[in-house]
Every structure is written in C-alpha cells, then in structure tokens.
Amino acid sequence: MTLIAINENSNLSFLTKGSRDFLVHRAIVLGLYTTTSILVKGALDAHGSKLMPDKKDFYYSFTCE
C-alpha cells in the first residue's frame, strides 16, 4: 500500500526540479557572495584593522568622513 502511494502521480510535484529552482539557487548564492564580499572588504578596510594599519597612506576613506 505504501509503494502505491509513493509511486502515484500526485507526489511528483515534490520530486521534480525545474529551471526556477536553479534560478532561485543562483539568486541566493549571488546574494550571499555579495554580502560576504562587502563584509570582508569592510573588515579589511576598517580604521582599527591590524591587517592594514597604514590605510591612511592609501588615500582611501569612506564618503562620510
């Protein structure tokens, strides 16, 4: 009885994946990549960063300063 329920056509909507799933996946990955890139850039360019202590010598600053 359970094999018949698994193989029915009504359950196929849960098993199929289409191009929309691929596009949603790509959109989520792009958003996560962009967010991560912004956070890493902000962390590396911060004033108190130990990774780049001579930031003022590169003449780069935020527009609000």
Image (cartoon, rainbow, N blue to C red):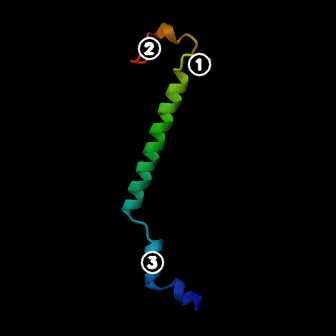
Relative to 48, does residue 14 appear above or below in the rendering? below
Of badges 3 and 1, nearer the viewer stands: 1
Q: Amino acid at mark 2?
A: Tyr
- Percent across and percent down for residue 17 are 43, 66
- Percent across and percent down for residue 50 are 62, 17
Q: Are marks 2 and 1 in contact (CB under 8 Å)?
A: no
Q: Amino acid at mark 3?
A: Leu
SS category of the residue bearing label 2? loop
| Quarter location, residue 3 | bottom right
Q: Are marks 3 and 1 in contact (CB under 8 Å)?
A: no
Sequence-first tag of 2 and 1: 1
Residue on which the image places disc 3: 12
Relative to 11, does residue 31 appear above or below in the rendering? above
Q: Distance between the Cα atoms at labels 3 and 2? A: 56 Å
Name the mark on residue 60: 2
| Quarter location, residue 2 | bottom right
Q: Is residue 43 left or right of residue 64?
A: right
SS category of the residue bearing label 1? loop
Sequence-first tag of 3 and 1: 3
Residue on which the image places disc 1: 49
Sequence-first tag of 3 and 2: 3
SS category of the residue bearing label 3? helix
Relative to 59, does residue 34 appear above or below in the rendering? below
Please report the residue visible at 59 percent of the width from the left and 19 percent of the height from the top.
Answer: 49
